[in-house]
Image (spheres, rainbow, N blue to C red):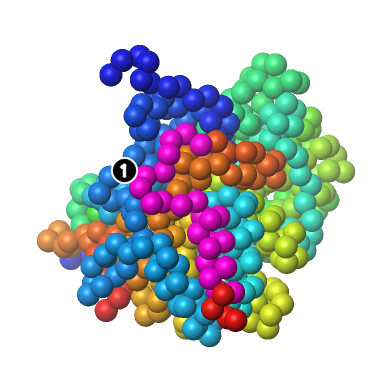
Amino acid sequence: MTEEEVQKITDVVCPFCGCLCDDVEIDVANNKVVTTYNACTIGTTKFFSVNETEHRFTKPMLRKNGKFVPISWDEAIERAAKILLNAERPLLYGFSSTSNEAIGEGFKLAEEVGGVLDQTASVCHGPSVLAIQDVGRSAATLGEIRSRANVIVYWGSNPSAAHPRHMSRYSMFVRGFFREKGAKERTLIVVDPRNTDAAKLADIHIKVEQGKDYELVSAMRAALRGIEIPEMVAGIPKKDILEVLEIMKKAYFGVVFFGMGLTQTFGRHRNIDNAINLIRELNSYTKWIISPMRGHYNVTGAGTVWTWQTGYPMSIDFARGYPRYNPGEYCANDILVNGEADAALIIASDPGAHFPAKSIRHLAKIPVIAIEPHITPTTELAELILPPAIVGVETEGTAYRMDHVPIRLRKVVDAPDECLPDEVILERLTQKVRELKK
Amino acid sequence: MSSSIQVNLITGRTVQQGRALEGSKHSDEYTRAAGIIELDPEDMRKLKIYTGTVVKVTTAHGSVNVRAILSPNAPHPGLAFIPMGPWGNAVINTDIYSVGMPSFKGVEATVEPIPEGKVLSALELMHELQK
């Protein structure tokens, strides 16, 4: 391969996690990704995953006698539209790894078929969304955090596994406008029951007993008000709790990044509610903000776009023709565990891998349409595959970073064969549904 | 080898699991990344097993075979970790406590060695659930 054949594409945005790193560079030759620069190990794998393999769907597929056979787009769209129209309670789920444009189209389709619309936040930061709706949140962009923060807390979140570049781009190991000495001027506190890689890097590791975060936050709030606390709370000695509180009170600018350690354990949104109130109370001493570590690169976008369109960020039911919102009743897992859904359209997500077995048992019984580029546990359950072009690699689109900053994703290579952008697939589906309803 | 232990089970992300998400869910790489349970050295000693031994994890919600590995995030005696994926999800608590979120973390589980056991792939686990 000669030098001329390799084309370097700069300012590429990585479509993996909520960090949306926008400094990635990619070498492309013969429409294939050959090298990535700056991306983390997971981002790099995502860019390479677009290179066509036998495990990539490049044509619409229909399951016949247990095997997938290719069909035309026209037939696939018509079949999918009929499945959704014939269902009493179709579920449209996923959306957090696609563009805002596609997310917007998803709403139109859900409204047209009277379905339940949900996104991956319902098994991720859904409880955070509920807590923020209840008590609000003090927020800042990642840029501001990088420029100013000198006390950084990761609570129930392991950025070294889920957001590999978060610490080095936005929080701890990076120089900022007011933090010219970088990490030397910052203090890293990690609250985690395990000695994770992030905890190993921390100045202070608070090894909280698993599932006892609520008690720890409550004790910190009490101590902040001068109330005597027990000698030991959630496995942490009183002296350590008071010491951390002193550091937090004396911060110039502090930030708490929190993750699934709070949202997926007992208490759920109440854990977040409590943590936000701790931050609110710390603001009577100094500047503190609190920020969820959003997982999928555009899960923030799914919530934001649907909030413009319907007033609600997730778990939206259109059965009555207008949007109704009730997490606990209309979340994907609710309607699967309760056996309500009688058809499902899954896009840009993999409930087969990430939902509990009980939900999947129901998913296996109903017709599933998957808009998914690769073989996944979900496609094993699907009867129809609509192959998409991968947003941010094979097609452009806009996404929201975890701090609600919108970023335009770039196209790096052409999509293989018959793959279409998610947005186009959903638009065609909606058109077909409207046509069939006449 | 018939000893078993009680643990508090959590699931979550790892870098290897994250890498395997992208276009490799059909592969052994995914099974190696997420079809495992990270145990504290003390718990491994109680079970009298080495890294790589197949164990059966059982909860009130199901059971699944995974490979035991020595936790890189120890010490955390009594706490066990399965990376997020179909293996962990076969045994987590499905109660959604009126907010739509299953209990992916904090489930009581029994771990027992079954050295002759087989760890199913992600796709095979789906076929099991289809039955």
- The x, y position of residue A14, in whole percent, is 52, 37
- Callout 1: SS: loop
Region in magenta:
A411-434
Report if residue A253 is visible in the image.
yes
Task: Characterize the local packing of mark 1: few (<14), some (14-19) or many (20 or more) Cα atoms within 10 angstroms.
Answer: some
Report if residue A246 is visible in the image.
no
Looking at the rendered image, the quarter that the C terminus of chain A falls into is bottom right
Q: Measured along the vertical axis of the image, is residue A410 above or below residue A376?
A: above
Indicate the quadrant where residue A169 lies.
top right
Q: Amino acid at mark 1?
A: Glu
Q: State yes or no: residue A423 in magenta.
A: yes
Residue beneath disc 1: A52
Instruction: Give me the residue at 64% from left, 39% from top.
Output: A407
Question: Does residue A195 appear left or right of residue A157 in this picture?
Answer: left
Q: State yes or no: residue A290 in magenta.
A: no
**Subunit that carries the residue with mark 1:** A
Instruction: Give me the residue at 73% from left, 62% from top.
Output: A309
Q: Measured along the vertical axis of the image, is residue A265 above or below residue A388?
A: below
Looking at the rendered image, the quarter that the N terminus of chain A falls into is top left
Question: Does residue A66 appear left or right of residue A242 in this picture?
Answer: left
Instruction: Give me the residue at 47% from left, 39% from top.
Output: A393
Looking at the picture, tell me which residue is in the foreground, B104 or B8: B104
Q: Measured along the vertical axis of the image, is residue A134 above or below residue A226?
A: below
Q: Measured along the vertical axis of the image, is residue A436 above or below residue A370?
A: below
- The x, y position of residue A308, in whole percent, is 75, 59
Looking at the picture, tell me which residue is in the foreground, A99 or A290: A99
- The x, y position of residue A29, in whole percent, is 36, 26
Indicate the quadrant where residue A253 lies.
top right
